[in-house]
Image (spheres, grey):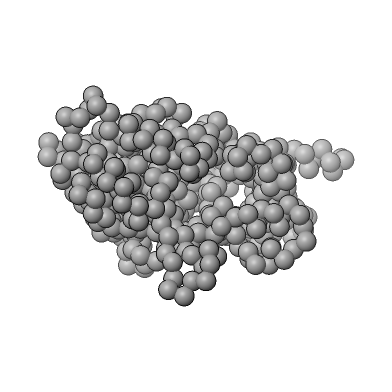
Amino acid sequence: MNMYPIGLIVFLSGMFATVAGAPFFAWPAGVAAVAFLYGLVRNAQSKKQAFGAGLLWAMGWQISALYWLPRAFYMDAGNDMAAAIFGGGPAVLGLALYGALGIGAVCALAFAAGPRWRAPAFAGAWVLLEILKSTTPYGFPWLPLGAMLVGSPWLLQLASVGGVFGLSLLILTVAILISSWSYVRYGVAAVLLLSVAMWGGWRLHVASLNPGEDGPTVRVVQPNIQGLHKWEASTRYAYLERTLQVAFPEGLADKKPDVIVLPETAVAFYLDEELPVKEVVAGKLRPGQTLLTGTVRREIPPLARGPNDILFYNSLMAMDATGKLLDVYDKHLLVPFGEVIPFHALLNRLNIPFIRTVSESRLDYAYGTAPSLLVTPAGPVVGLICYEGIFPFYVARWAQNARFLVNITNDNWFTGTIALDQHMALAKLRAVETGKPLVRGANTGISVVVDGYGREVARLPVNQSSLMDVPLPPVAPTPIFAQILGYLL
């Protein structure tokens, strides 16, 4: 048989896995796609063939799931099509290849393990790969298999025991079982899924959403500011005023939420430096309220010789009605090529016009070092800025002493694509893993409040200026996953 049609089938089967994730959550399709891949590995004639099958399959999955990257480059460059083509295009292929090489290596390792150990090697190596990718900002843990089960509340509860990795292991195990024609294995797979679902249903049944009459209230604000104009000197005051109008409408003047959450970089000023701006923002607050807002911050070292020596931070600040800054958190995990350019000096010296232009035109943020916990009237909160919410170990480390999680993001870059739902699904996993409620405030993404079991309490419509006042759900009993990481981290 001609190898080209076979290669196309393998590539398309990987693409099939995309419909298993957000926003479709057709997880049986993902199980079937992984089962097909394992069948290719089991029937491969050599380690090289197994690697090639995994590489091709994963390229189909990664490209179809990350197709939205050119739009992010397009938006970031001010609606520049050249950035989408020459920046976003290579970014999709590069990230897809990065992810696919890992899966190809998993398949080669599984083949090399021999028939007896092939199945455990395949599942174990895949989970290990996901764990390794979750330990560094450069790992990009955007497409774990376990995220396919976020849309299934009963199965999702397994994340409280094994985190997203436990969910991935469940998918891999079921896929391996159904990859061969065996009614016994089909039965085992069905019993396994049914057992996990029944336990998850029981866990949700005994859970309570009622925070009590005296529970704190959180206001989530979605300004829906489009584009990059809020950074321009001529328009940023107008955009700030618009954001404050959404956050503090006259019709809700009698309501007093304990915490008000504004999204990432909602205040496009140096809030800790610019006193007039601070007074305007603080003037909207009432005594006892705390504002959590995304903003930017800078530090000018004593020996700074010019603008290149100034440190800039993507920050989350807590402020009270007097204008006092109660806490400041600077983002720890920066987005590679978005907020920080890896090997920046080397790229500047490259004689490749587009890469050099992008590198020279970008200003790196500095890495934050302060703890992620901030003080609020509702209790300590873990501040997660955008990308940070996709890292399970990082979130679990700071969540141990927190009352709830706050994930602020922009996500304007992804409007109209499945990236909005992918990003939100990963953040929702963090709530189940830690047992802490999640308050997610997006500029125009998906703004939502989720309890410690992953259930949505409230959500704002995408692409609309809106707000919601939501009683903060209670903290769930500490999940096993969080207890284990509490000893290790």
Residue in front for this viewpoint, 457 or 326: 326
Which quadrant of the figure has residue 204? top left
* Residue occupying the far bottom of the picture: 303
Question: Number of labelled discs?
Answer: 0
Q: Residue at x 61, y 62 (%)?
A: 342
Residue in front for this viewpoint, 114 or 319: 319
Q: Quadrant of the C terminus?
A: bottom left
Which quadrant of the figure has residue 488? bottom left
Percent from the top left, x then y, of residue 409? 43, 44
Percent from the top left, x then y, of residue 298? 43, 60
Using the image, determine if residue 252 lies above or below residue 231: above
Percent from the top left, x then y, of residue 90? 71, 48
Q: Residue at x 60, y 55 (%)?
A: 362
Residue in front for this viewpoint, 359 or 170: 359
Using the image, determine if residue 140 lies above or below residue 151: below
The answer, for residue 145, to whether it is visible in the render is yes
Q: Quadrant of the N terminus?
A: top right
Left or right: 77, with 339 as reference point = right
* Residue occupying the far left of the picture: 214
Residue in front for this viewpoint, 258 or 55: 258
The answer, for residue 181, to whether it is visible in the render is no
Using the image, determine if residue 326 lies above or below residue 464: below
* Residue occupying the far top of the picture: 251
Percent from the top left, x then y, of residue 446? 43, 35
Q: Residue at x 29, y 42 (%)?
A: 280
Left or right: 425, with 473 as reference point = right
Q: Residue at x 36, y 29 (%)?
A: 466
